[in-house]
Amino acid sequence: MLTAAKKEFIEFMMSADVLRFGDFTTKSGRKTPYFVNTGNYKTGLQNSRLGEFYAALVKETVGDQFDAMFGPAYKGIPLATSVSGALARNYGIDKPFFFNRKEAKDHGEGGNIVGYKPQDGDRVIIIEDVITAGTAIRETMPVLQACADVKVTDMFISVNRCEVGQNPGKTAVMEVGEEFGIKVHALVTVQDIREYLADKEEYAHLLPLMDAYMKQYCVF
C-alpha cells in the first residue's frame, strides 16, 4: 500500500535524481528501467532528510535494541552517518556507528574499520542503499565477522527491488534472511514505485517497462 510517507520518500528520491527511469544495468548485470543511486545525494539538506527517513524506520522497527550501526563502503558511509545523527536528534537514540575501508590501512590506527570498534556480542544493524541480487551483503558479512563475534540483526535499505536472488523463487532479501538471519527493512518496494507511477499520467509510458521487468526478475 502506497502510504503518504512512502509517496513522500519516492518524490524525495526523484527530486534528488536518485530514483531515475531509463535504460540501466544493475551491479548484477540485469537490464532495468529504473535505477536507485544514492550517490546522487549531494547537499547537506538532502543528507539530513534522508537520515530522517531511515531513522523513522529504525525507530519503528527496532527502536534502541541494537548496539552499533554499520555503513558498508562506500555508499553506506554517509548513510550511516546521517541516520545515526537523525536517531540521536529526533528520538534520543544515541548509538555508535562504524564503517569499513575498501583497502586496509597499514599506518596510523591501521586496519580497515573506522569509527566504533565492535565488541563480542554486539548487536549490529546495517544501513545500505538497495539490495538487488544480494552481492553487496555477501561481501559485507565477512568484513563484520572479522571484526568481532557480532550479531547482525537487521538491515535497512531505501528500496526493496524484490528481485530474484541466486535461487529461483526467492528474492535476494529472502535469501539474506535465510542465509544470515538478518531481517531486512525497506523504506519502499518496487510495487510502491509502480503504484506511484500508475497514479501519474505523465509516467504512463513507463508502466509496460516496469511490468515486463517485474515479471522477468521479481518475486512477490
Image: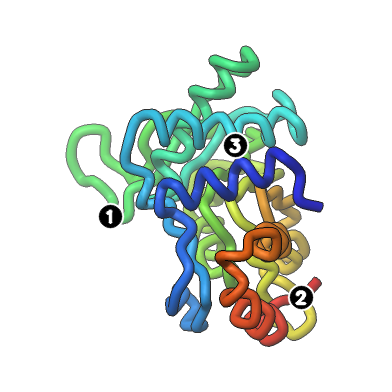
Q: Nearer the viewer, residue 70 or 168?
A: 168
Q: Label for residue 7?
A: none
x and y, in percent, of residue 26 in the image: 47, 74
Q: Label for residue 103?
A: 1
Residue under circle 2?
A: 219
CA separation in Å, label 1 and label 3:
28 Å
Dot 1 or dot 3: first in sequence order is 3
x and y, in percent, of residue 112 in the image: 34, 46
Q: Amino acid at mark 2?
A: Val
Q: Secondary structure at mark 1?
A: strand
Nearest-to-viewer mark from 2 and 1: 2
Dot 2 or dot 1: first in sequence order is 1
CA separation in Å, label 2 and label 3:
24 Å
Residue 203 seen anywhere in this rendered image of the structure? yes
Figure check: 36 above or below 67: below
Among all residues in the image, which is located at the extreme front? 201
x and y, in percent, of residue 169 in the image: 79, 81
Nearest-to-viewer mark from 1 and 3: 3
Q: Secondary structure at mark 3?
A: helix
